[in-house]
Each structure stands twice: as structure tokens, then as C-alpha cells.
């Protein structure tokens, strides 16, 4: 069955960096685009970033553009999110999610989600 | 595209019908709209895609409808496990995807 397991969250000071990972299994990783979505405590869902199956296309929310980088290692079935210059308002649970398709032409619906990893930005 | 969900909270009893609204600030291309359910402490789960297509394993008491800028998620008869927060999402050719603010369905 499809499994997405995030890791790498924790407490970090403002201005510092953190790298999240999402280990995928149970499906052909190279056939799907992947996404990061976050949820601040008590708030709704916010899309963060997306990457196509081959890394040809990468998209970012304005709130993280220039600070976050999404990447993937298809040899290890792993998605990453490099987060630099972190701010207190980046505090959230970060979910990885699978796109229904490969994300070469368009973003589709998110058909599977991981359980999330909590990132807390605080001094 | 900004998605506005209403009401913010819906207080209903098990067995009742729930009607949730999602309104878009501009027309959603090809009805590229999805609905997700999120229970407390859990990840979101896909319910509906393409405005009206149920995802695999979703009970038929969940249905989606609408087009253009107005979309609806209907739960025909609420089961105890349906009390949760529901989000709509627009996707498609734009490189940006957005979620609505959510509707909480709580037990009355």
C-alpha cells in the first residue's frame, strides 16, 4: 500500500535551516509528482511546493519562494524540502502528498498524504 | 484563485444531511476541484476530485457537485466518523494550487 513517511522536523531558531524528507513506498515513485503542504497550529492547509516526477517543474508558494527548495531523489524514492532563513510563521506540521499524475503539465489532486512532521521556529 | 468555504462550523446530529459550500473568486478550470476530510490529529484524506468523482473507498453518502465558481460537498446521512474538518482545493493548469479555509462539522 502507498506509504509516505516524513522526517526531519524539530525546533529551530529563526534564521536557521532545516531539511525535511519524505520516504515513499508502495508505488512507482517516478510516475508521480509530489507536494509539500503545511498546517500551522489550529489553522488550515497551505500549499508550499511541488515537483514533477523528473524535477523538470518546480513550483513554490509566494510565502516560501527564495527560501525553500523542493527536490527528489528518485533512486531512493525520497522527497526533500530544504528550508532556509526560517521564520516563526513557518511553524507548522509539514505534510508530503502524492500527485495523482506526474505534474508535467498540471497539478492534479493529492491522492495520498503522509502523517506529517512538526517544524517549530522559535528562539 | 481564492476559495471561500461556508459555513465555518456546521453543528448537526448523526443521521442528518450536511451541505458544505466552496465558492471560488474566479471560475475553476474544467471543474478541477477536490474535497478532503481531516480528522483531529490526522492527515487529510481525499474524498472527491474533479468536483464530483469519489475517490477510491469513499462511501457513497459523500457526493460533490457544482461548476464554475460554486461547489458543494454533501454528506447525505452523517455517521459518527464523519465529524471532522473539510477542505476544498482548486488545482489545474496554474502552477499554484489553493485550499479553502475549511468547514468544521461538529456534533450538535
Image (cartoon, grey):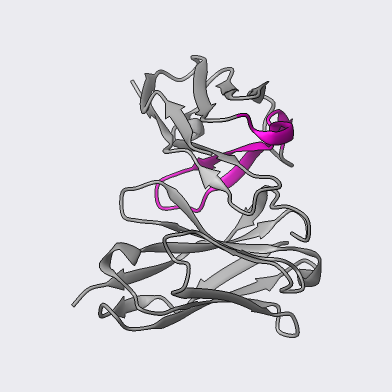
- Please indicate whether residue B77 sits to the left or right of residue B40 in the image: right
Residue furthest left as drawn = A123
Residue A11 quadrant: bottom left
Instruction: Using the image as rendered, state which of residue B105 and residue A40 is in the foreground.
Output: A40
Magenta stretch: give its range: B27-54
Quick check: can you spot residue A91? no
Residue B64 rendering spot, x and y as whole percentages: 65, 25
Point 65% across, 55% down: residue: A112
* Residue B28 % position (x, y): 64, 33
Instruction: Please state if A13 lies on the left or on the right of A114 as rendered.
Output: left
* Rendered image quadrant of residue A63: bottom left
Residue plotted at (47% across, 38% down): B100
Query: Residue B70 location in percent, x, y?
Result: 58, 22
Q: Say if residue A114 shows up in the picture.
A: yes
Q: Nearer the viewer, residue B108 or B43?
A: B43
The percent position of residue A50, horizontal first and vertical second, equals 61, 63
Closer-to-camera residue (A70/B85): A70
Please indicate whether residue A11 sits to the left or right of residue A54 in the image.
left
Residue A106 sits above or below residue B74 on the image = below
From the viewer's perspective, tell me whether residue B3 is left or right of residue B45.
Answer: left
Amino acid at each position: 500500500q502507498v506509504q509516505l513517511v516524513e522526517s526531519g522536523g524539530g525546533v529551530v531558531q529563526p534564521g536557521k535551516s532545516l531539511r525535511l524528507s519524505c520516504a515513499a513506498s508502495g508505488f512507482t515513485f517516478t510516475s508521480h509528482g509530489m507536494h509539500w503542504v503545511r498546517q500551522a497550529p489550529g489553522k488550515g492547509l497551505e500549499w508550499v511546493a511541488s515537483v514533477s516526477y523528473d524535477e523538470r517543474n518546480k513550483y513554490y508558494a509566494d510565502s516560501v519562494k527564495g527560501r525553500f527548495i523542493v527536490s527528489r531523489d528518485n533512486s531512493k524514492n525520497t522527497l526533500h524540502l530544504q528550508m532556509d532563513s526560517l521564520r516563526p510563521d513557518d511553524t507548522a506540521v509539514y505534510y508530503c502528498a502524492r500527485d495523482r499524475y506526474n505534474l508535467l503539465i498540471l497539478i492534479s489532486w493529492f491522492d495520498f498524504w503522509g502523517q506529517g512532521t512538526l517544524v517549530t521556529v522559535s528562539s | 484563485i481564492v476559495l471561500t468555504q461556508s459555513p465555518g462550523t456546521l453543528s448537526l446530529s448523526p443521521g442528518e444531511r450536511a451541505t458544505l459550500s466552496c465558492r471560488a473568486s474566479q471560475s475553476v478550470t474544467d471543474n478541477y476541484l477536490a474535497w478532503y476530510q481531516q480528522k483531529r490529529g490526522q492527515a487529510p484524506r481525499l474524498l472527491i476530485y474533479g468536483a464530483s468523482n469519489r475517490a477510491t473507498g469513499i462511501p457513497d453518502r459523500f457526493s460533490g457537485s457544482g461548476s464554475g465558481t460554486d461547489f458543494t460537498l454533501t454528506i447525505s446521512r452523517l455517521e459518527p466518523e464523519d465529524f471532522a474538518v473539510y477542505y476544498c482545493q482548486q488545482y489545474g493548469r496554474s502552477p499554484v494550487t489553493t485550499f479553502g479555509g475549511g468547514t468544521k462539522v461538529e456534533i450538535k
